[in-house]
Image: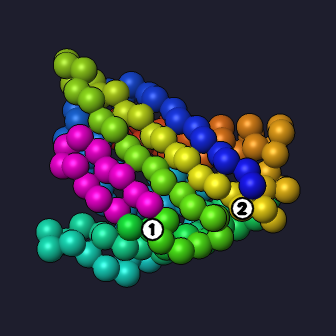
């Protein structure tokens, strides 16, 4: 069993509503998050936002598929939890905080149990690289997208 936990915070030169619009538009996420190979929306909430998706991600040592449910906290962020997939379990979140002067603090966080088999591949320096890859990719990708 390998617990993988990581987060990354960035300051973005864009307002919170712009950042929220980007993270809540899940079908467009592969355009700015390099580790995400594809996303298929399976169900939506009444407001049209994706509630259940299937994501294929580059896990560096293996491609990972997860069926994930999303909950939104409009303007403040979102949370997600794997319902089914290659990992034993996965939870994550985006938290957005308005800093004033058009700046936003965005924190991307993940916590997962890679399971026994994947855990054997993802340990030590490989685990550290994977955590950096996943969190930096998401946080820096959001920053680049919001500031463009």
Q: Which sits in the foreground, 51 or 32?
A: 51
Residue 2, image x, y percentages = 73, 51
| Residue 94 visible, this angle | yes
Mark 2 lies on residue: 115
Magenta-drawn segment:
70-81
Indicate whether residue 132 is drawn in magenta.
Answer: no
The local secondary structure at tag 1 comes to: strand
Look at discs 1 and 2 and give the one toward the viewer.
2
Residue 54, image x, y percentages = 48, 74
**Seen in the image, is 143 located left or right of residue 49?**
right
| Residue 31 visible, this angle | no
Density class for disc 1 (Cα within 10 Å; few <14, some 14-19, many ≥20) is many
Residue 32 against residue 9 in the figure, above or below: below
Density class for disc 2 (Cα within 10 Å; few <14, some 14-19, many ≥20) is some
Residue 79 against residue 96 in the figure, above or below: below
Check the picture and name the quadrant holding the N terminus: bottom right
Residue 5 against residue 41 in the figure, above or below: above
The residue shown at (65%, 38%) is 132
Q: Which sits in the foreground, 53 or 30?
A: 53
The local secondary structure at tag 2 comes to: helix
Mark 1 lies on residue: 68
Residue 120 against residue 146 in the figure, above or below: below
Examine the image and state in which quarter residue 69 appears: bottom left
């Amino acid at each position: 069993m390998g617990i993988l936990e990581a987060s990354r915070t960035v300051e973005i030169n864009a307002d919170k509503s712009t950042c929220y619009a980007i993270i809540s538009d899940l079908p467009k996420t592969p355009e700015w998050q390099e580790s995400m190979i594809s996303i298929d929306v399976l169900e939506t909430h009444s407001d049209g936002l994706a509630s259940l998706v299937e994501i294929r991600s580059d896990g560096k040592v293996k491609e990972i598929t997860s069926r994930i449910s999303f909950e939104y906290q409009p303007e403040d962020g979102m949370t997600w939890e794997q319902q089914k997939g290659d990992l034993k379990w996965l939870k994550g979140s985006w938290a957005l905080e308005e800093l004033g002067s058009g700046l936003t603090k965005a924190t991307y966080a993940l916590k997962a149990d890679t399971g026994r088999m994947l855990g054997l591949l993802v340990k030590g320096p490989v685990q550290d690289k994977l955590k950096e890859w996943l969190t930096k990719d998401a946080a820096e990708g959001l920053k680049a997208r919001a500031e463009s």
